[in-house]
Amino acid sequence: MSIYYVPDTKCFIIQSHAFSYVMEKDEKGVLHNIYTGKHLTDPENALCSLSHITGNFRSADVFPYREEYPCKNSFTFDPYCLRARFDDGTEDVRLIYKSHAIGKTKDGETLTITLRDSFYKFEVDLCYRTYTGLGVISKNAVIRNCGEKSVTLCDFGSGAVYTFRGNKIRLLHLGGSWGAEYKKTYSQVENGKFAISNQRGTCASHQHIPFFAADGGTANEKHGEIWYGLLHWSGNFKLEAEVNQCMCPTITAGINNEGCKYVLKCGESFETPLFTFGYTDGGYEKMRETLYDLQYDFLAPQNRIKKPFPIIYNTWYPYEMDVNEENCIYLVDKAKDAGAELFVIDDGWFPDRCGDQNVSGLEGLGDWFCDKHKFPNGLAPVADAVHKAGLLFGLWIEPEMVCEKTGLFNEHPEWVLGFENREPVKTRNQMVLNLARTDVLEFIWDTLYRIITEYKLDYLKWDMNSYITACGNALFDGNQNEIPVRYINNLYELFGRMNKAFPKLLIEVCAAGGGRSDYGMLPYADRINRSDNADPVDVLRLHEGFCEFLLPRFAGGAGNIAKNPSMHGRNVPLDYRAKLGMTGSMSIGMNILKMTKQELDELKNYLDEYKNMRNVTQNSYFYVLSSAFENHVTAWEYLSRDRRKGYLFIFCHGWVRSEDIILYPYRLRGLEENRKYRVNGYSIPFNSKAQNGVFSGSVLMNCGISADLRGDYRAAIIDFEAAD
Ligand code: DGJ
């Protein structure tokens, strides 16, 4: 990507091999978005794409008015990012160019365009950053009150994306509900508005992900123009897509302003979260390739993402909350023998934690010390046993929470979110701490620092099992409306401090399973709990939806090799469950204490196979050859980013001749046409004997290879590697 300014045409240009982004300041100084799309050879001449630009509302009724950072004012009716009320009641923001600066960072280039209101002392920095070699841009806004009197921000979006001009767009978005997250949904937007949003405070990626991919209705995996975007935010968000009367589709992204106003006093500023967006004409798979490169090379923790993530065994599967020193130590060697590399004590290790359903009335969250009855000598004996066995040691915590009968609540009832004259809101018998407060932030940080050092942790599973619905606090010393934003910023502050103080600590982000699967968490996460649902048929869709925007290597879950029967009572052979587990970040979800020697030996073999392949699968692209959302046979290709080595995973959960016979063969994607690849494990339909051979990329991508997988719950892995 390169960024430059062309004085002749007054254009700002952000240019990559795949993508051009052009802004122009008009004679009044208003900054317009001229073009967002396929690479232009002469982007400075893109001005013809808007037939007219005007600040006159009569003309705005006829011609598209694409303000780069659209504001609510008196002469447009179009979607906006910023609505601000000045002290005298004026709710009309008119931004014009003030200055700009182009710079460099270790990741790429930056552009800051400062706009100022034409009357009030009020400024907005539009900040753009690029990533070397990648066709995506991240942008956000820093909104500044330079006047003496307060300004109230009523809406404060991160930015807008304008696609092609046409009368409709189709939006791919992801969402669902607990246990059924990431459902791919396509919504048509035509002559009106469509929105997805979160008002649950946080942990709402069960319902909606702040992600969209817009196209004209015909894009598919391999072909088509797509404009896509993601908001890096784990709190309330909104994405709105509108096709206006000028047939100008606009998509805005930002924090959800519902119930949230931000007051900027004299000299104060507000920074919006990052909004990353891009364009491709190569279909969804090209979009994913770019998003994957972005995560591997820039967004994920760079000191940890290059290493394979270890295989987890978690006490939750044999014991749930019934953990103690003796049973944990007993389990360590068994977990090691089964093939695990990281031993995790889940929920239940702190005082009075017997359950979450008010059986005892004591549920302990908040008092983050070992239960003296369960762990009379603290956690050190378990940590030592784990380390002695050569495994890593990890712990579960849910630090944003407090239960009523705890020392913490006794001492600080004022730390809980809620309204004074209303019953406290409880989910799972627990209440949410007001992390918008600095004293709560410092309490959680002291707790984290203490347990990570004292218990010699290599891994931390950070859980959060509630929404934030009572977003008030009579005793909060700030503006109550600011809680939703301050809460999330302080959450990131805590994760950031952990990254800094413990750079090797592996972090799993979990929120009742998949409630925090978003780009806000990416700088801190090594693993993201995909879902609490590990049923092997449901996981096919969960994983495919998750991988639409997140790396497969992040995909943790309720045991990636699921227990049997599954939570839905489905009986599925170990071979199928183990191969499915290999597609994500492996954990053993079974009670290994109840497995026979033969089952354990089989499990170990699968885990050895996984250990051999994970260097590739954890640093690869992901292609959907047959979608779990459409077929009984799912086929996913994992291809190393140097395009030399890969695996084709095929899962058949119920073969139907009339439909699935046509799925043979699977045409690979992303290979080099002229390179020869050695292929192991393919088979010819109606002949299950596995075969090997050497084929060109061209043959593999055009003729394809097959696997004979008739029946129910059959799985195959075909591997291929460059032969030279
Ligand atoms: C919800 C998580 O998703 C589970 O993995 C487990 O850690 C439980 N919480 C513990 O309470």
Image: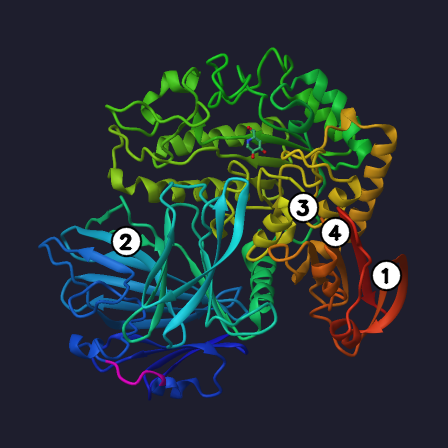
Up the image or down, 159 lies above or below 1; here it is: above
Question: Residue visible at 74% across and 30% down?
Answer: 387
Up the image or down, 424 lies above or below 587; here it is: above
Element on which disc 4 rests: helix
Q: Quadrant of residue 578?
A: top right
Between 649 and 394, which is closer to the camera in this rendering?
649
Q: Residues within 10 Å of mark 4 (few under 14, many from 20)?
A: many
Residue extent of the magenta highlight = 49-53
Residue 562: percent from the left, percent from the top?
A: 69, 37
Label 1 belongs to which residue?
683
Ligand 1 position by quadrant: top right
Q: Residue 269, labelled with which disc?
A: 2
Q: CA distance from mark 2 to mark 1?
A: 62 Å
Left or right of 292? Residue 235 is: left
Residue 303 in view: no
Sequence order check, earlier mark of 1 and 4: 4
Q: Residues within 10 Å of mark 2 (few under 14, many from 20)?
A: some
Disc 1 marks a residue whose amino acid type is Ser
Q: CA distance from mark 2 to mark 4?
A: 45 Å
Element on which disc 1 rests: strand
Residue 59: percent from the left, percent from the top?
A: 19, 79
Q: Are marks 1 and 4 in contact (CB under 8 Å)?
A: no
Left or right of 600? Residue 240 is: left
Question: Residue visible at 16% across and 57% down?
Answer: 147
Question: Residue visible at 28% across and 47% down?
Answer: 258
Sequence order check, earlier mark of 2 and 1: 2
Element on which disc 3 rests: loop
